[in-house]
Amino acid sequence: MLLLLLLKRLDHAAEIDERSGLLVYGAWRTRAASILARPRGNDDHCGLLIIDIDNFTMINDTYGHLAGDSVIEAVANAIRHEARRADVVGRFGGDEFVVLIDSLHEQWAVGPIAERIRDAVRDLAVSVGSPSGSRTINGLTVSIGGALHSTEHGYPDLTAFLWAADAALYSAKHAGRNAVHMNPSIPG
């Protein structure tokens, strides 16, 4: 019994990114695909957000990689706080995060969630220690790309969903960063 409990804890630990405290991408993808495969009602919509910290390389180059890790943790906490309890939040890669927003009765609700995340990150003041003393990093921004899925298109394909959100993310970045851009709909 103890061995089973330890194996379960190890399995759970392997799903969590140690820097952000969020799901690693593989675990996020497994959970997201499972949720998207569920039967949906006529008014059951979902959304997907990809969030990228703007100019993250500059943070690492200016303050150091340990400070960058503190920024990753702070941004992850802001995203987790602004996402709904049922949303699936993960770390996509280096300075990118993903949020699957499920069971929405109104598609338009995805945009306000993305804006709340953007605002929460903008308001962060991240204290970081360094050999030369403590510093505060503020003025952080994120670019967010989102995609929406309506039940009228059937079951969403996770890969197509990710491509649509990624295209919107690059649209936000090319528009000057610190923005939310949404793809209105993806095919099933």
Image (tube, grey):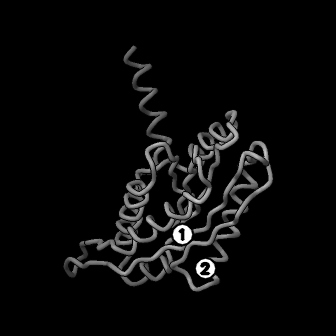
Residue 75 x %, y %: 40, 64
**Residue that appears at 46% across and 83% down:** 58
Q: Which residue is mark 2?
A: 173
- Please indicate whether residue 124 sits to the left or right of residue 181 in the image: left
Crowd tier of the residue under label 2, counting other residues whose Cα lies within 10 Å: few below 14, some 14–19, many 20 or above: many
Query: In the displayed image of the protein, which residue is found farthest to the left?
Result: 133
**Residue that appears at 51% across and 47% down:** 87
Crowd tier of the residue under label 1, counting other residues whose Cα lies within 10 Å: few below 14, some 14–19, many 20 or above: many
Q: Which residue is mark 1?
A: 52
Question: Which numbered disc, 2 or 1, marks the residue that appears first in the sequence?
Answer: 1
Residue 148 x %, y %: 67, 57
- Please indicate whether residue 174 sits to the left or right of residue 122 in the image: right
The amino acid pointed to by label 2 is Lys
User: Looking at the image, which is closer to me, 170 or 131?
Assistant: 170
Q: Do the CB atoms of the residues marked 2 and 1 lie less than 8 Å apart?
A: yes
The amino acid pointed to by label 1 is Asp
Residue 22 x %, y %: 45, 50
- Please indicate whether residue 179 sits to the left or right of residue 159 in the image: left
Query: In the displayed image of the protein, which residue is found farthest to the top?
Result: 1
Q: Quadrant of the N terminus?
A: top left
Residue 57 x %, y %: 49, 79
